[in-house]
Image: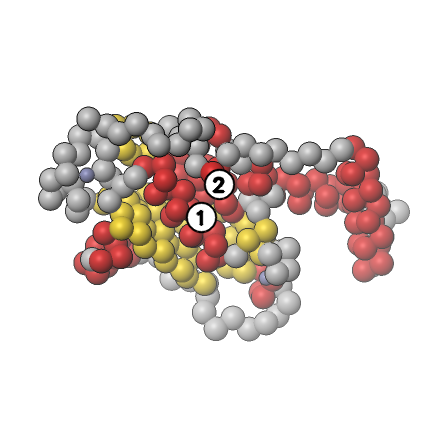
Amino acid sequence: MSEVDPDEDNGVPELARANPRHLSTEDFLRFERYAAEMLGSLGLDLSSPGARETPRRFVRAFFDATQGYDGDPKLVTTFKTECHGGPDCELSQVIEGPIPFFALCEHHALPFHGNVYVGYIAHEHIIGLSKLTRLVRLFARRFTVQERMGQQIAQTLQEILEPHGVAVYIEAHHTCTQMRGVRELTPSTRTSFWRGHYEENPALRQEFLRMTTPTPR
Ligand SMILES: [Zn+2]
Ligand SMILES: [Zn+2]
């Protein structure tokens, strides 16, 4: 017997619900003027053929890169499994990745990018790789930080699948530090998040980390 989704909104978790931003044409035109003033003052030659349209493209690129705020109601498509709560079920991991992402650091509004690995111990539902990619994009295409992104991915996957455990591992390069010549002590920033069985079982965490084997750079 599978459980009925407890959520009223067709099982779409709060964080993933569609909530489209409303920006008018006037808003965009105003933002383009702000961008032109800023970029021009910094040194961009706005009269050159290559840069004439840059303020418009700049605003548009930021709008597209933050689409995660619009939500993703198509996220929730899960498949049934045959879990009956046996010991086998509670130990076998599904691990997906690398799932590449691009996000904007909320401190500098500059990109950080890398890979996400997702692991879970399925109970009655599993989810396809394409939906996991959507899940990662939902929280990456925002102004965010690596820690929050990982927590939101883990929490939403927990709500969608109600699995026995969730693991999320993220390795990312932060252009805000790299571009400005701040010396990085490590080649990438790595964070991990554990829910359910992963929290209590170090062997599961080790297996997950071994199988995700981040490539050293
Ligand atoms: Zn930053
Ligand atoms: Zn189960």
> Are there few (<14), some (14-19), or many (20+) residues within 10 Å of tag 1?
many
Q: Residue at x 64, y 60 (%)?
A: 108
The x and y percentages for residue 153 are 42, 46
Query: Which of the numbered marks, if any, corresponds to residue 152?
Result: 1
In primary-sequence order, the first of circles 2 and 1 is: 2
| Residue at which label 2 appears | 15
Give, as a three-letter code, the residue at label 2: Leu
- Tell me if 153 is positioned left or right of 65 in this view: left
In the rendered image, the residue lying farthest to the left is 87
Residue 99 in view, yes or no: no
Q: Residue at x 24, y 44 (%)?
A: 164
Residue 159 in view, yes or no: yes
> Are there few (<14), some (14-19), or many (20+) residues within 10 Å of tag 2?
some
Q: Is residue 211 above or below residue 64?
A: below
Secondary structure state at the residue bearing disc 2: helix
Quarter-of-image position of residue 177:
bottom right
The x and y percentages for residue 98 are 38, 47
Query: Which of the numbered marks, if any, corresponds to residue 37?
Result: none
Along the viewing direction, whichever of 20 and 167 lies nearer the viewer: 20
Give, as a three-letter code, the residue at label 1: Gln
